[in-house]
Image: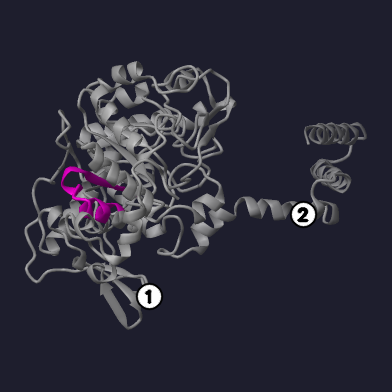
Amino acid sequence: MKRIAIVVLALAAGTVAVVAAVGLSPWWWAAAVPLTLLGLLGVADLSQRRHSVLRNYPVLGHARFLLERIRPELQQYFIERNFDGRPFDRDVRTIVYERAKGTDAEQPYGTERDVYQPGYEFLVPSMAPCPVPKTPPRVRIGGPDCARPYDMALLNVSAMSFGSLSSNAILALNGGAAAGGFAHDTGEGGLSEYHLKPGGDLVWEIGTGYFGCRTPDGDFDPAEFADKAAHDHVKCVSLKLSQGAKPGIGGVLPGAKVNAEIAKVRDVPEGRTVISPPYHKVFSTPRELVRFIARMRELSGGKPTGFKLCVGSRRQFLAVCKAMLAEGTAPDFIIVDGGEGGTGAAPLEFADHVGTPLTEGLLTVHNALVGAGLRDRIRIGASGKIATGTDLVKRLVQGADYGNAARAMMFAVGCIQAQRCHTNTCPTGVTTQDPRRARALDVRDKTPRVQRFQEATVASALQLMASMGVTDPADLRPHMLRRRIDPYTERSYEELYEWLEPGQLLAEPPAAWAADWTAADPDRFTV
């Protein structure tokens, strides 16, 4: 294509020279150049062999590729309605933008949603609403084995790595977390200076690549881990088992993206492709996983330690619960990532068809811990398309203690859902390592937007809970959230799902859980 472009430009220049030499009028200049270029483009289209459309429809065929290229923008800005866009509809994006800017996020004239559509969910208001708490409640993270518990906000920044996000995006997110008093998950890409400089509280996430605490051959380095985990800004440590966007597979960072800065943060060679395996080297059984969590807590000086996963086999999670009981120790928190996907690019088949959605994932983890008698010592975080106060309250009803947001936080710093996160061509400078594009994101302007969005969303959640007659999230109950089954029937979550009693799996497992509980083996991940 470069050769064709050079030939086209050379011939165009020759045409201009000929027109000038014979002394024709300026009108000939105006017509000769574009006609020559179109003619040469047609010749190039007819001679190339890559695109059949261009061979049959030279010149005109390019319109097809142009329209295909701008199709997402046309869909987003001119075709989709306010409430049916994907992954986030216009209503949700608008409410995030408005809250981040500190402007009104209200809508006149009633809802545009079809409240009789199957799947529609609504919260149950009380006839005796409560006053809205003046101070948002926090969640104490830290079980009996934790020496340095942490009070988590109701909404925090979910896992997004430096490398996936630009340095300016990380600075703005962490600065907002510092100003608002909430936590910022680093993602598995390592602990960078951009996470540390603003001073926000951090949840340091360790993935299968052990970036930032790895040996030259890719194993876990306990000494480096202990050194970095001791940093004052690191409040919790999280081991990532899987993520919602692509559970069961690892990641690849092309060598072209591994510059000196990223190589230093991740402890990898500069310029070489980095592969995160789909599995961990530090454990291969549920029992080994539980032991490693305990080791991480010890190495971190007693800070809260947990793991993140996109739920798959209920039997395997029950095996982890059995391992906790057998070993007499447990994680301080578990983050449930929904199969709805996230900021990381993933194969379409994984994004669309692998992993348990957040609702069922939360219900599985919450009920398994309750049934095993472990729920009171383990906090549950929910991560998956939390963008509004309603989203947060729903997840609290479904079993979470707090929520994490990734894409909504990206909206707060300027993301427009262009869905070019993996191409390094993000138009707003959020998900790119191109310095020219990243500079478009002004840290001083975006930092307070992150703070305002989080503060307004938590305030909205508290206002919703107060309207339901609740001031403490722990008092939310399954009957307070209802789902429409068909145009004539709606049911509460208490009716739709089975809710286990504390210790029920240990005493007499219900029929729906008995087979999985019996088959769960703390010494192997049974399929």
Whether the magenta-drawn stretch holds residue 377 is answered as: yes
Whether the magenta-drawn stretch holds residue 213 is answered as: no
Residue 237 in view in this figure: no
**Dots 1, 2 in contact, CB < 8 A:** no
Q: Residue at x 17, y 32 (%)?
A: 145
Q: Secondary structure at mark 1?
A: loop
Q: Secondary structure at mark 2?
A: loop
Tell me where residue 112 appears, x and y as whole percent: 35, 70
Q: Earlier in the sequence, mark 1 or mark 2?
A: 2
Given the image, on which type of amino acid does mark 2 rest? Gly
Q: Residue at x 41, y 58 (%)?
A: 90
Tell me where residue 32 appears, x and y as whole percent: 84, 43
Please give the range of residues in magenta.
365-383
Given the image, on which type of amino acid does mark 1 rest? Gln
Q: Nearer the viewer, residue 380 or 452?
A: 380
Return the mark for residue 61: 2
Tell me where residue 69 appears, x and y as whole percent: 63, 50
Provide the residue designation for mark 1: 117
Q: 94 left or right of 125?
A: right
Give the total of numbered labels. 2
Q: CA distance from mark 1 to mark 2?
A: 42 Å
Q: Nearer the viewer, residue 372 or 267?
A: 372
423 over 395 or under it: above or below: above
